[in-house]
Image: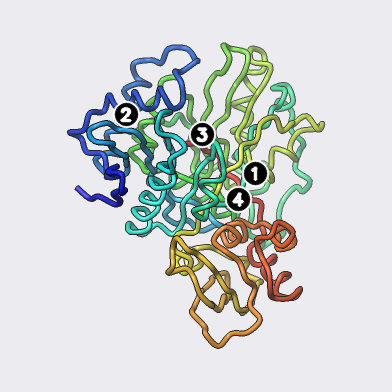
Amino acid sequence: MAIYLTSQGGTEIREVAPEDDLEALYDLSRRAFGPSSGPPDSSLARASRQALLDAAIDDRRVFAAFDGDQMVASARYHDMRQWWHGRSMPMAGVSGVMVAPEHRGRGLGRKLMTALLAAIASRGYPLSVLYPATTPIYRSLGWELAGGHQYAVIPARSLRALVPPDTAGKSPGVPGDEPIGTERPAPIRRAGPADAGEVLTVIGRAHERARDCGPNTRDPVTIARWLADPELFAYLAADGFLAYHWHGGNDEILVQRAVAATDRTLRDLWSIVASHSSIAPTVRARIGPADPLWWLTREPDVRLRDREQWMLRVVDAPAAIAARGFPASVQLSLPLWIEDDERPGNSGLWELAVTGGRGHLIHSPEATHPVTMGARGFAALYAGIPMATLRLAGLAAGGNPVADSELDGAFAGSSFMLDSF
């Protein structure tokens, strides 16, 4: 059993083990977040949550603080992958951060997150993401606001007749979608738990082709459990995936995923959703800020309704730069000074080099006039926040306008996720 931190007051922070009292973890959750206000869960939903918790404990991804024998705080992380400009890398998705009400205000949450960050780093994750209920504690440890998770609301009738393609076909030799009217290579079919691996492959192919920044995927076992939910309706094609369920009775369809690598498949997937328009007048969909749906409806009927921000932490700066994708046209080499008290290995004077869609971060003590930023500023830059914004927010200094322009070109992108945790 690994103990990552023991406070002077005797509070021990360690991994939760299967032999620990898990009822104490449930009690802590109820005290920290309150009882569920929604309808009673199905036995399958409860069993799925229990299976996910058991798997997280078995994988040593759940941590807790103990005051004597009493569990007084807890946090966990999910083993995920995240896409950055069309390339994926491991990412630790932090969730379930909670402190018992009677132990709040004593710095216990920060100690717990410090231990969790150390564990995430020791296990080789270049990045970590979380959805904050409050930001000060996470900012103090190097997480910063990076992107959004948003819902759009669309009248279902608007999906029944999408705007036709602006071109009838492609010029010879130009890669892209098949011309309208050509035979489809494979039909769209229903997807189930046995398709988890293929679903991940298809989703990944869509994010890669779109050069998306931010979307995350989970492991095949978790995806299989998701696809086993009888209230989820999922459809799979060779180049696209759709998953949705009924929401708010039968008045609304909630689309959790609608991604495709070709325009023909994307239209076919949305036509499945549109087929419910006579029953469900409204569609609520998780989509990104540049999702094709914004350009497919005949009228400006797509409305952004809810947006939740998430925070990013660059855990291993050289590894995160090496794993990330960059625009193929960008070529740069410039000095960068990073200050990171929590992860000293990220600190120091670096040369950031980008060429051919790949990046490298190499220690360069001879560099002069670097752009300077802390862990928070570097996380925001990584997520595509413009340098002008970082400077006005006090997250970047030094350098010059040419360096700012080059950094904007390298990291440009609106980061988003299609999953919350």
Q: Foreground residue, 35 or 351?
A: 35
- Residue drawn at point x = 46 percent, y = 51 percent: 128
Q: Secondary structure at mark 2?
A: helix
Residue beneath disc 4: 146
Q: Residue furthest right?
A: 299
- Relative to 178, say whether 99 is above or below: above
Q: Are marks 4 and 2 in contact (CB under 8 Å)?
A: no
Q: Residue at x 62, y 50 (%)?
A: 415
Q: Is residue 319 left or right of residue 123?
A: right
Quadrant housing residue 369: bottom right
Q: Is residue 3 above or below residue 28?
A: below
* Image: 35 above or below 72: above
Q: In the rendered image, which residue does mark 1 sit on?
A: 263
The residue labelled by disc 3 is 188
Q: Nearer the viewer, residue 379 or 163?
A: 379
- For discs 3 and 2, the disc positioned in front in the rendered view: 2
- Residue kind at label 4, given as amino acid type: Ala
Q: Could you tell which of marks 3 and 1 lies nearer the N-terminus? A: 3
Crowd band around label 2 with a 10 angstrom C-alpha radius: few (<14), some (14–19), many (20+): some
Quarter where residue 300 is shown: top right
- Depth check, mark 1 against mark 4: the one in front is 4
Which residue position holds label 2?
25
Secondary structure type for disc 1: helix
